[in-house]
Amino acid sequence: MNPMPKHVEIELYHTIGGIVIRYGFIDTLIADLCRILFEDLGGHSSEKKPPRPIGVRLKYIAKCFRNKPELAHWKDGAEDFIELIKTVDGVRNYLIHGCLTQYYPDQKAFRFTKLDRNEDETGYQQNSIIYSHDQLAGFAQACTEVVRNLQAIGRDLERVAARKKNGQ
């Protein structure tokens, strides 16, 4: 791997740290949305237990938004929003479950490599992706936007649940 100047390394750590910390909020806020949907708003018939993996949680949220009239106002924006969360999750996967394998000083870019199971589960394959520092900074900013949106959705779901609890 090309040597990385200390200031670039510090910037990279700062940016990746921002993504990781914000992603922790994203994961917790998504879990809380599922809690409200499952416990307070009756959930969706497709899930008998609280959903756990992020992909299952996101599908669950989308189903609830599509099928609960009191949540219909979230339906249209939910698909785009869920896609953004999946994109951020994909980036986080490379940063957390992969390793930095190359630095490209002329592009201020970084290659991350990880091992994934083959689709048919017959073994593993190595996958790599290159992100520029600007892309990583953009992902950190996207995480901030996602957190804000999830907080707004959570507040709205709490209000819907309170109205349902009070019989309105």
Image: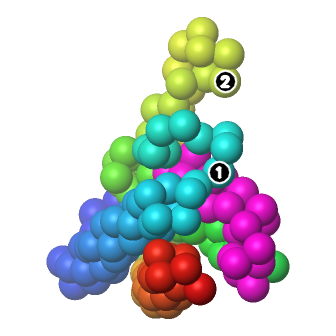
Query: Quick one: label 1, few (<14), some, or many (20+) residues within 10 Å?
Result: some
Residue 17: x and y in percent read: 26, 73
On whether residue 72 falls in the magenta region, the answer is yes
Query: Quick one: label 2, few (<14), some, or many (20+) residues within 10 Å?
Result: few
Residue wearing tag 1 = 44
Apparent side of residue 69 relative to residue 54 in the rendered image (left or right): right
Apparent side of residue 66 relative to residue 17 in the rendered image (left or right): right
Asked if 158 appears above or below 118 in the picture, the reply is: below
Residue 168: x and y in percent read: 59, 86
Residue at 65% over, 67% down: 82
Residue wearing tag 2 = 119
- Residue in front for this viewpoint, 131 or 19: 19
On whether residue 165 falls in the magenta region, the answer is no
- Inspect the image, locate mark 2, and give the three-letter code of the amino acid beneath it: Glu
Residue at 54% over, 13% down: 123
Magenta segment, which residues?
54-74
- Magenta-highlighted stretch: main secondary structure? helix
Local SS, label 1: loop
- Inspect the image, locate mark 1, and give the three-letter code of the amino acid beneath it: His
Residue at 72% over, 57% down: 63
